[in-house]
Amino acid sequence: MALRDWIPRRWRPGPGPGQTPVHVGDPDYDSWEVVRDFVDVRTARAWHQALEEAGIDAVLTADWPLDRFGSGDIALRVPAERWSEAEWHLSNLDD
């Protein structure tokens, strides 16, 4: 059990998976590597949360605004030096 598991969700730092922002057209993350692509924001946020809980910095980006249903071309990105660790972690979620 992680140390933060005993802390009620409302007191935990950072946004929950439903609040993770999607950075649209933000060049600050162009150097970050894409780990996965998604078409809906709900799924993207769940995978983002998995990386954040593993201690891996991650962001969600899109080149264009999402439609009213939260669909679009969404990329889950991590810093270039953390790509292999993120890929390993996400690949092992199925096990």
Image (spheres, rainbow, N blue to C red):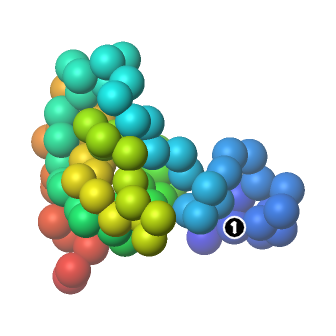
**Residue at screen point 37% across, 24% down:** 26
Secondary structure at numbered mark 1:
helix
Residue 63 drawn at (x, y percent):
27, 37
Q: Is residue 40 above or below residue 74?
A: below
- Name the residue nearer the viewer: 65 or 10: 65
Residue at x-position 85% and y-position 56%: 11
Left or right position of 41 against 87: right
Q: Give percent across and percent down for residue 21.
A: 53, 45
Given residues 83 and 23, the one toward you in this image is 23
Q: Residue furthest front?
A: 68
Bin the neighbour count of mark 1 within 10 Å (Cα to Cα): few under 14, some 14-19, many 20 and up: few
Name the residue beneath numbered marker 1: 5
Identity, as a three-letter code, of the amino acid under mark 1: Asp
18 or 47, nearer to the observer: 18
Q: Position of residue 43 (x, y in %)?
A: 37, 71
The image quarter containing residue 6 is: bottom right
Quadrant of the rendering where the N terminus is positioned: bottom right
